[in-house]
Amino acid sequence: MTELDRDGKLAGYYPSAWPVECGGPRRQKLVSSPGLALKDGERLLSTTRQMDGWAVMQVQRAPGEIFVQGGAGLGQSEFPPQYRDQGDTSGWLERIDPITLKTLARSPELPSGGHLWCGAVVVHENGDLYMVNGRYCHRLDEDCRVVAERKLPVDAPYNGLLILSDGNLLMKNLGTDPSVNCKFSLLEPERLESVGEPLEIPEACMGRFSSDRTKEGEFVYFTSATKIYRLRYEGGRLMLDSDWQGSYEIEGEDQGDGWDTSVGSDCIWMMDMGRPPPWRGLASAPQRAFRFPIDDPGERDVIETFGMPNAVNVGPPLYDPERRILVAYDMMNGKVGAWRFEGPGQYASLWQHDWRCAVQMILYSDTGELVLEDGAAMGPASSAEGSMAVVVDIETGRELGRAPSGAPSISGMFFCPGYGRDFYSGSLRGAIARYYVEG
């Protein structure tokens, strides 16, 4: 059975509850620390702060340390990614006060090669932080001082950053342009020197990627416009596993690309309809989720979710391996719901809400508290206060609490757990928030 990212130390990563987006390389988004345990009579409140740019994500390092990745801000009419040959394109890293959100340390401005996109930041087992921003990768210490810098081989923004079990860093370019092939790059963590030549995939690959460590080996899973692939990592070398491939294409449908993959219960979970309308026009198909058994990716499940045309999402679903619950959403049509996996091809609908979620959800495993978003963009707002973080019971969908994120519209970014009964968020337009429980 697939291991859980939250259980035990992850080789290569700093031993915190959240050293990387989604909590670990399998992208399960399961929080190992105690849940919020919201009770009747308690409220979820928030403290917010506006950064001077794009607030991408937060990660945990040592106890009480929260780091946030920042990037150059976008104009009101700009949709990411953007390229600027002049003007502000830099990113930065901050260590912030875990209660007030005030800046405690900040890096110098970090080059991006002119590319504006939400890269990634991870905390390495050596204690330093590694950040992909545009076309660059940086190594920074706990005081946000630059230790090493590397310009990456593809003149494009990079999408995703994970640490492999030997400590090497893996990243790939964003597949905005279908004519630009995907290239995976490996860097060693000391001086950010390349480990071999980049591995080219003869397709564009839009989403981020996941990795799994098993008795059979170490694997990387990712999507192209219609397929799901696997890489094998062995002896510091990446190889395409030519015997492992699945397709999420629905014949005859005007379908959008999938984003990230998640690994759980010996399966790969994902959604289609991810390519944003500004990149290709609005696709007409409805949203679907997919399950691919790792031992036979040709035997897929297609989960019909909301059945509404012109669907769009901006990330992967969440799958809870212990409760066997899949949570999916359609951002464009403002729907989020949960289904229980009862066996191959068998899914029981548990609940649905008319909420516009555009964020990477998280789940407190012990309490079953699911954190998601009720946003206010692309149509009438279901929340009058802009984007709201909402906590629900994953089994029933019952709302337990909500609080504003400080973002006027959907946030589109990541949640990160805190060190007590609290958690954090970032947003495309620069708001960061700490959410906490008050009796």
Image: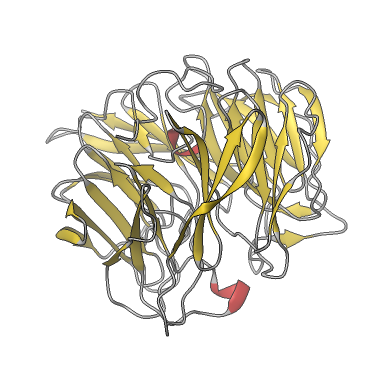
Percent of width and height locating residue 195: 76, 32
Percent of width and height locating residue 83: 78, 60
Instruction: Count all numbered tags in the image, as a single digit.
Output: 0
The answer to whether 70 is drawn above or below residue 254 in the figure is above
Percent of width and height locating residue 308: 31, 78
Q: Is residue 288 left or right of residue 434?
A: left
Quarter of the figure that contains the C terminus = top left
Residue furthest right as drawn: 86
Q: Is residue 113 left or right of residue 391?
A: right
Percent of width and height locating residue 121: 61, 35
| Quarter of the view holding residue 161 | top right
- Using the rendered image of the protein, determine whether residue 92 is visible from the camera's viewpoint: yes
| Quarter of the view holding residue 355 | bottom left
Which residue is at 72% across, 70% downward?
179
Residues 52 and 33: in front is: 33
The answer to whether 236 is drawn above or below residue 347 in the figure is above
Which residue is at 29% across, 41% downward?
265
Which residue is at 44% across, 18% downward?
9
Q: Is residue 352 left or right of residue 268?
A: left
- Using the rendered image of the protein, determine whether residue 390 is visible from the camera's viewpoint: no
Quarter of the figure that contains the N terminus = top left
Residues 170 and 239: in front is: 239
The answer to whether 262 is drawn above or below residue 45 in the figure is below
Scheme by which the image is coloured: secondary structure
Residue furthest bottom as drawn: 252
